[in-house]
Every structure is written in C-alpha cells, then in structure tokens.
C-alpha cells in the first residue's frame, strides 16, 4: 500500500521504468519509498524526484537538481580545458518553481505521462 503523499501514477511510472532498467525487488521498492519520504521531508516533491531520475536515466532517487546544472556548457573539445559549469543565476523561490514545473512537464511528456498543466 502506498503512502497517501505518493501519487499512484508517479509510483507506477517509477516501477515501470525500474523494471526495464534494473532488478526491482520488494526490498528495493521499500527502500525507494523510504528515500522518497526522506527527500520529501527535505522539500523535494516525490514526482519531481522520480521524473528527474527517469529523464536523466538514473536508477536511483536523488534530491532535485536545480540551478547548478541548468547553466551547463559544452564539454571540452579538442583537448581545450574549459569549465563544464557556469555559475547559476540566483532565482527567487517563485522563479525556481516555474523552471522546475517546466522541466517536470517536459520529463513527464518524455515518459508518456499525461500532465494537466496550464501555462500562465
């Protein structure tokens, strides 16, 4: 039985993804739910965590990455050393939420999930 804070659709998507990518035991499921609960306690929405992992091809669940990865530059080419990351701009909580919402909708579409989302 799923905890009330974990949407069934999100969990179903994660289970289907994990079954395709890696072993999916009962113990692994329990550990993932515990991890989602821990991350939820740190302020990360379970759906954001799951769809980030699916979008990036990860088999684990991690805190939602914001800011530092959005400013990524091209990797070094031709032996030239470059910084792989540029400093991320400081975003307000509202701006950060808009960026995250946009990326979650894109990730959900890639995962084939119908998301009821309206543009503001």
Image: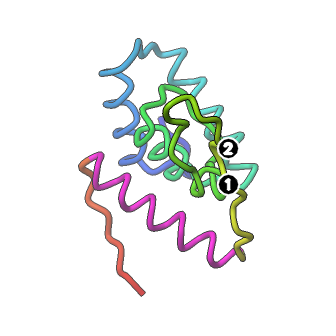
Residue nearest the viewer, comparing 40 with 26: 40
Residue designated by label 1: 86
Residue 101 among magenta residues: yes
Q: Is residue 19 left or right of residue 29?
A: left
Residue nearest the viewer, comparing 83 with 68: 83
Tell me where residue 8 appears, x and y as whole percent.
40, 46
Q: Is residue 72 above or below residue 82?
A: below
Residue nearest the viewer, comparing 61 with 103: 103
Rounded to the nearest angstrom, the CA distance separating label 2 from label 1 is: 7 Å
Residue nearest the viewer, comparing 29 with 47: 47
Q: Is residue 72 above or below residue 96?
A: above
Tell me where residue 68 appears, x and y as whole percent.
67, 52
Q: Which mark is residue 83?
A: 2
For mark 2, does the 10 Å Cα neighbourhood hold few (<14), some (14 to 19), or many (20 or more) residues? few
Give the residues in magenta. 93-111
Frontmost of labels 2 and 1 is: 2
Query: Going 29% across and 46% down the picture, which residue do you hit?
Result: 111
């Amino acid at each position: 039985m799923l905890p009330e804070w974990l949407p069934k659709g999100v969990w179903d998507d994660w289970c289907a993804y994990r079954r395709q990518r890696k072993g999916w035991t009962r113990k692994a499921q329990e550990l993932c739910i515990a991890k989602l609960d821990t991350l939820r306690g740190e302020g990360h929405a379970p759906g954001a965590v799951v769809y980030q992992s699916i979008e990036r091809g990860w088999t684990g669940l991690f805190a939602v990455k914001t800011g530092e990865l959005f400013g990524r530059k091209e990797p070094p080419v031709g032996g030239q050393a470059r910084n792989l990351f540029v400093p991320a701009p400081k975003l307000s909580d509202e701006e950060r939420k808009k960026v995250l919402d946009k990326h979650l909708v894109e990730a959900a579409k890639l995962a084939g999930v119908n998301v009821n989302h309206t543009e503001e």
